[in-house]
Image: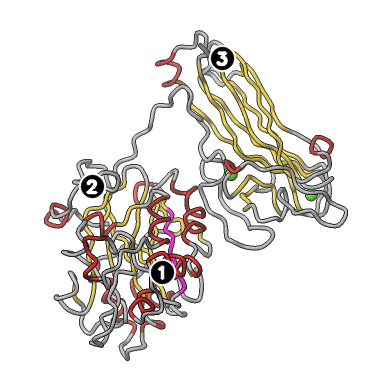
């Protein structure tokens, strides 16, 4: 955490969706996020790893997404007194903030003040590198360049993976994208890019998902402030310099204060470290996170937090995704439930010998669902996820008269096993006395025609007088079949509204 750097954020310009702004809340926190390709483990140019650490210190970074860490991340983190989460042979996230969970795409960090933020870190496929192919005459139209880039780097898949986490925010995405930005190869900057205008697909997809490019938000003019990170090495006359290392951000209350290039000389970098240890410059951005203000719930709004198990992206693995916390939910008695990716393992299992096609799944259910997951071999058991929903503020402003509640969700299981799921809502008064209890779901194999999948269930009724809060209990029940509870649910919703 750092004090605001006034000179820097004053230099930032305002834009509409992605805006840089002045921190005005005393309870706000500030942090600095860096993306740094350290070149083959950091020592490749003959310098000690301490020089890479010096660059991170010069950047004042609190969180660093490393690429080409190649086994150096833990040592680098130790040198800086940071924690470390390794995503792959190339990528790792190191941070002064505690790491709550991590997977191959990123890490969930515990920030000062108790907030949590996902930081995603990517090192996308370097070759074929389209700017070289344009230079060398191997591509002749922008459409060809865009198609060639999309063939080796899947921007839409990346955007889909992180979309769920963005609903809650704050979320950061950093990386060596090995692809320029569509914000840079614009008409006005054609002279820098062989006279070409290219809508590069990864940056387009990431922006389309709602993420803001920190550098381009602070420095909107790519001619005046190119921000090139590739490459500080050499002076080959035909080298193509570009901004392929970027820091993105999203989430309510997150604003960028400054964005700086860290590199070898003042001509190319805002922060200089000499000798520079990598063939990429790094980029660092300072962010302000506004104080958390509790939103007053509204009529017509789904009041369930993390209602589709999307908030914490699970690893992109085959089969069982593993275990994770489910933010917004407390684990009740029984073994912890988890989120599972739709990857053909359980409720979306493809038809196989003797098993029919899975049930239709609406696209609105996203990438993941609530899942019992791996449990002990012991006989039938039930796992619980609990969430409390406070209604005082909503009912005070809306009044109870004529108000109705509606509870919805998708529930199911696997093939002809009777493992199942249900959602119970206990409507409670000011003393937690039970006014009404409703349960939806619990489809067994028969209700699914013996097919894997989820079926829609809902219930509706009048709001009882004296209501103050609701305790939701999602139950995932294992009845049979080895050590997996295939009880599954998704798309949960609790809405209060007044029918006209
Ligand atoms: Ca979902
Ligand atoms: Ca089972």
Residue 442: say if magenta: no
Q: Which residues are magenta?
A: 118-125
Q: Residues within 10 Å of mark 1 (few under 14, many from 20)?
A: many
Q: Residues within 10 Å of mark 2 (few under 14, many from 20)?
A: few
Which residue extends farthest top? 401
- State left or right for residue 167 relative to residue 187: right
The correct choice, above or below, for 499 with respect to 281 in the image is: above
Helix, strand or loop status at disc 3: loop
| Circles 1 and 3: CB atoms closer than 8 Å | no
Note whether 288 is above or below 394 in the view shown.
below
Q: Disc number at residue 463?
A: 3
Q: Which percent across, then down, holds residue 74?
A: 44, 75
> Position of 481 compared to 499: left or right?
right
**Residue 19, horizontal then vertical, whole percent:** 25, 47
Q: Which residue is mark 1?
A: 145
Relative side of 261 to 158, left or right: left
Q: Nearer the viewer, mark 2 or mark 3?
A: 2
Distance between the Cα atoms at labels 2 and 1? 29 Å
Q: Residue furthest left?
A: 7
Query: Residue drawn 46% across and 80% down?
Result: 70
- Kind of element beneath mark 2: loop
Neighbour tally class for label 3: few under 14, some 14-19, many 20 plus, Cα within 10 Å: many
**Badge number at residue 15:** 2
Residue 235, relative to residue 157: is it above or below?
below
- Kind of element beneath mark 1: helix
Between 141 and 454, the one lying in front of the other is: 141
Give residue 21's position: percent from left, percent from top. Answer: 21, 47
| Label located before the other in sequence (1 or 3) | 1
For residue 18, the mark is: none
């Amino acid at each position: 955490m750092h004090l605001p750097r006034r000179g820097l954020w004053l230099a930032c310009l305002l834009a509409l969706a992605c805006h840089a702004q002045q921190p005005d809340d005393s309870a706000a926190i500030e942090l600095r996020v860096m993306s740094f390709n350290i070149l083959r483990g950091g020592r490749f140019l003959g310098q000690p790893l301490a020089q890479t650490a010096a660059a991170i210190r010069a950047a004042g970074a609190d969180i660093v997404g490393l690429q080409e860490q190649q086994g150096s991340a833990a040592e680098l983190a130790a040198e800086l007194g940071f924690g470390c989460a390794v995503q792959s042979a190339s990528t790792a996230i190191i941070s002064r903030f505690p790491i709550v969970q991590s997977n191959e795409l990123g890490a969930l960090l515990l920030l000062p003040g108790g907030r949590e933020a996902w930081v995603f870190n990517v090192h996308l496929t370097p070759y074929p590198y389209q700017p070289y192919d344009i230079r060398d005459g191997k591509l002749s139209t922008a459409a060809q360049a865009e198609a060639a880039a999309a063939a080796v780097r899947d921007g839409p898949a990346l955007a889909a993976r992180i979309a769920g986490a963005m609903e809650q925010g704050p979320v950061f995405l950093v990386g060596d994208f090995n692809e320029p930005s569509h914000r840079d190869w614009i008409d006005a900057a054609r002279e820098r890019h062989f006279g070409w205008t290219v809508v590069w697909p990864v940056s387009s997809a990431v922006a389309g998902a709602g993420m803001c490019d920190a550098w381009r938000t602070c420095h909107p003019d790519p001619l005046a402030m190119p921000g090139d990170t590739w490459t500080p090495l050499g002076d080959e006359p035909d080298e193509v310099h570009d901004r392929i290392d970027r820091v993105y951000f999203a989430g309510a209350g997150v604003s960028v204060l400054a964005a700086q290039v860290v590199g070898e000389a003042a001509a190319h970098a805002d922060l200089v470290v000499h000798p520079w240890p990598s063939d990429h410059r790094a980029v660092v951005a300072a962010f302000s996170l506004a104080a958390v203000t509790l939103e007053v719930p509204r009529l017509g709004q789904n009041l369930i937090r993390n209602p589709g198990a999307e908030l914490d992206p699970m690893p992109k693995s085959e089969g069982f995704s593993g275990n994770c916390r489910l933010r917004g939910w407390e684990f009740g008695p029984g073994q912890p439930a988890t989120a599972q990716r739709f990857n053909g393992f359980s409720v979306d299992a493809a038809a196989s010998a003797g098993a029919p096609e899975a049930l239709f799944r609406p696209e609105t259910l996203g990438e993941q669902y609530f899942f019992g997951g791996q449990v002990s071999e012991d006989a039938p058991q039930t796992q619980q996820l609990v969430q409390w929903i406070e209604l005082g503020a909503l009912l005070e402003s809306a009044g109870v008269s004529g108000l109705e509640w509606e509870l919805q969700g998708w529930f199911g299981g696997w093939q002809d096993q009777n493992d199942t799921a249900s959602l119970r809502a206990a409507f409670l008064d000011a003393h937690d006395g039970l006014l009404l209890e409703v349960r939806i779901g619990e489809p067994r194999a028969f209700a699914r025609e013996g097919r894997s999948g989820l079926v829609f269930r809902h219930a509706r009724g009048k709001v009882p007088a004296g209501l103050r809060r609701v305790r939701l209990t999602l139950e995932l029940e294992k009845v049979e079949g080895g050590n997996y509870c295939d009880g599954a649910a998704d798309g949960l919703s609790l809405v209060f509204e007044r029918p006209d």
